[in-house]
Image: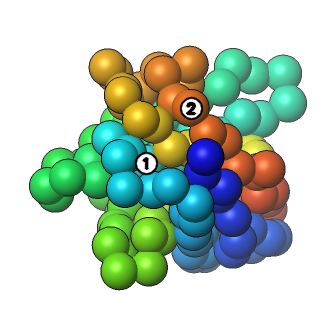
Amino acid sequence: QVQLAESGGGLVQAGGSLRLSCAASGRTFSGYAMGWFRQAPGKEREFVAAIRLSGSLTYSADSVKGRFTLSRDNAKNTVYLQMNSLKPEDTAVYFCVYGLTVNDVSRWYDYDYWGQGTQVTVSS
C-alpha cells in the first residue's frame, strides 16, 4: 500500500517556473517507477515524465524535454518535477504515479497508485 502526496501546483505566467513534489509513503520498497501524467479538460491523459526507482534512468515526453526535469530523493521517497519555460498548453491537472511492475512507463494504466492531482495553470 502506497500513498502519494503532491504539492507545488499553482498559477504562473507564461515563461515562469514551478516545481512539483510527490512524496510516497507506505510500502515503497518494491516499486519500479514513479512519474507524472497530466490531463487538461477535453484532452486525453498525457505522459509527462518518469524515473526508475532502481538506477537512474529517466523518461520524458518530447513535449517537455528541455523544459521539465525529473529528479528523485531516495532518502525522502520523493520525486520532483522542475517545470521551466511554462507555456499555456502546459495547463492541466498533474498526477503523480507509482508503479510496482511497470512494463511501459508512458502507459497510465501500468501504474498502481495515483495521487490526487495538483492544478497547474499557465496564463498568457
Horizontally, is 117 left or right of 83 in the view? right
Helix or strand or loop: what does disc 2 sit on?
Answer: loop
- Mark 2 to mark 1: distance in Å? 10 Å
Q: What residue is at 34 percent from the left and 21 percent from the top? A: 104
Q: What residue is at 56 percent from the left and 32 percent from the top? A: 112
Which residue is labeled 2 in the image? 112
- On the image, the x and y values in percent for residue 111 come to 52, 30
- On the image, the x and y values in percent for residue 86 come to 58, 62
- Residue in front for this viewpoint, 36 or 16: 36
Horizontally, is 27 left or right of 41 in the view? left
Q: In front of the other: label 2 or label 1?
A: 2
* Mark 2 vs 1, N-terminal side: 1
**Image quadrant containing the C terminus:** bottom right
Cβ atoms under marks 2 and 1 closer than 8 Å: no
Which residue is labeled 1 in the image? 34
Q: Residue furthest bottom?
A: 75
- On the image, the x and y values in percent for residue 7 come to 70, 71
Specify the quadrant of the image occupied by residue 97.
top right
- Residue in front for this viewpoint, 26 or 96: 26
Residue 22 versus residue 39 in the image, above or below: below
Are there few (<14), some (14-19), or many (20+) residues within 10 Å of tag 2?
some
Q: Amino acid at mark 1?
A: Met
- On the image, the x and y values in percent for residue 1 come to 61, 46
Are there few (<14), some (14-19), or many (20+) residues within 10 Å of tag 1?
many
Q: Amino acid at mark 2?
A: Asp
Horizontally, is 48 left or right of 25 in the view? left
How is colour applied across the structure in the image? rainbow
Camera sees residue 118: yes
Q: Which mark is residue 90?
A: none
Specify the quadrant of the image occupied by residue 40.
top right
Camera sees residue 91: no
